[in-house]
Amino acid sequence: MRSLAMRRTLWEPRKFKTCRRWLTQAADACVVANDADITPKMPPYEYTPPSYTGPAADEILKKRREFLSPSMFHLYKKPVNIVHGKMQYLFDENGRRYVDAFGGIATVCCGHCHPDVVKAVIDQTKSLQHSTILYLNHAIADFAEALASKLPGDLKVVFFTNSGTEANELAMMMARLYAGCHDIISLRNAYHGNAAGTMGATAQCNWKFNVVQSGVHHAVNPDPYRGLLGADGEKYAKDVQDLIQFGTSGHVAGFISEAIQGVGGIVELAPGYLPAVYHSIRKAGGICIADEVQSGFARTGSHFWGFESHDVVPDIVTMAKGIGNGVPLGAVVTTPKVAEVLTRRSYFNTFGGNPVCTAAGLAVLRVIDRENLQENAHVVGSYLKDRLNSLKAKHEIIGDVRGRGLMLGVELVTDRQLKTPANIEILQVMDQMKDMGVLIGKGGFHGNVFRITPPLCFSRDDADFVVDVMDLAMTKL
């Protein structure tokens, strides 16, 4: 048996180490607690929203549950009642201000209620709200001309729609008519709309809705982070070649893809992928469709359109959301040769290209140019991405930071090696960020990716605030 002195000698160092470890952990906990008491301050903004006298959030939520579709969902455990917007900020029923780090991708490009866009809508509404395309009106022609000037090559014939879904439906129909073939190739994890045809091409949602469309083939997603082939785009492109050779008759109508997958989690396509795929599709007689609904209109900063960063020129470009800064508007732009196919059919759109919406669209283009919003997206977006990468070095829960300009994604994982999706933790962080004044989006196949897509007038101070709030929320985890 060991003597008492020996036992004391053996025990005391362990006791000292245990105490030291406990003291260190206690000190760390105090630092976290002190940090948690210091909520980041929102950038100053000299603006007071008008008083709100409408129904409260609980009353609205009750009506939604009773009268609106059960398929509708909302963010946060306690939904926010947003009643007013001004540029990159939103205000709730109590007048509290939030930094909008997400709404830009949904609708707003220039900023909420931009005065120039509002004025264009009001002035046109006072003059003429709607007219059939069988009559002449300068609003639709002026906007079509301005929009075509933003596109490369022979992309200059514009068809206006009311949404991105309609635009992509029309684009796929035109590809099928032009090629005389039914087969369309799209990507897994893509999102192209919520009508029957576009949902068939939306592989990301097929497991939810099971909308199967004949003639639609889904290629392996060229995801540099989660893809099995890493960041080698040409290797992923071979799957498209195989689909053409073995999945079709060797002839395809077209290929549709986003340059950066939005709903799919801000996934950039692997370098070299689109040039290789476009070559294969055109060799098989097909049309190349670029879905720019989310990545278009200067959002990526380095280019006006997302596809431009891949050094390709598509045959058809579709767009919506930011095109009207909140006004329901979409468009398909193609070449005269492809556009001619619709003369063989009777195609029209009752509200597509109406004077009010096209007046808003033209105002948006002018604001982007006059206020240098593309440059701002590049400068502020690059700064924000650098700060997010610094945050990644601090928090193990961040598995990947990606995207371009003001279209950025932060993927959360519980294990960086296994890339296990942190789809529960992201909800906790989102709620805490909302409580501190930041509204942010969520996406990805596993629902574990922050989508940061603010209005293009976003500032460096706004970027700092968003990152500081995210940092604090993750620290609290």
Image (tube, rainbow, N blue to C red):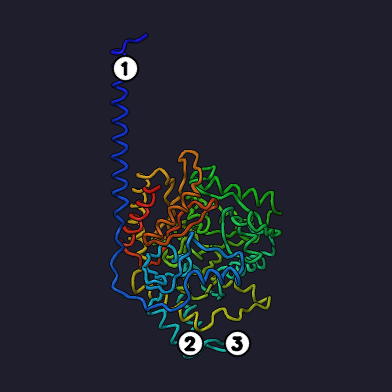
Residue 415 in the image: state x and y as whole percent: 47, 40
How many residues crowd mark 2 within 10 Å: few (<14), some (14–19), many (20+)?
A: some
Q: Position of residue 51 (x, y in %)?
A: 38, 78
Q: Amino acid at mark 3?
A: Leu
Amino acid found under the numbered disc labelled 2: Thr
Label 2: state its secondary structure.
Answer: helix
The reply to whether callout 1 and callout 3 are in contact (CB within 8 Å) is no
Choose the circle earlier in sequence order: 1 or 3.
1
Instruction: For marks 2 and 3, give the CA distance.
Output: 19 Å
Residue at image coords 47%, 78%: 145
| Quarter the N terminus occupies | top left
Instruction: Nearest to the eye among marks 2 and 3: give it.
Output: 2
Q: Earlier in the sequence, mark 2 or mark 1?
A: 1
**Separation (CA) of disc 1 from disc 3:** 96 Å
Q: Secondary structure at mark 3?
A: loop
Q: Is residue 375 visible?
A: no
Give the residue type that dot 1 points to: Leu
Tell me the residue that label 3 is attached to.
134
Q: Nearer the viewer, mark 2 or mark 1?
A: 1
The residue that disc 2 covers is 125
345 relative to 48 in the view: left or right: right
In the image, farthest residue toward the top: 1
Label count reads: 3
Q: Nearer the viewer, mark 1 or mark 3?
A: 1
Q: Crowding near pointer 3: few (<14 within 10 Å), some, many (20+)?
A: few
Query: Which residue is tagged 1?
Result: 10
44 or 290: nearer the eye? 44
- Asked whether, in this view, residue 454 is left or right of residue 140, the answer is left
Secondary element under disc 1, as helix, strand or loop, is helix
Q: Residues within 10 Å of mark 1 (few under 14, many from 20)?
A: few
The image position of residue 41, as x and y in percent, is 29, 60
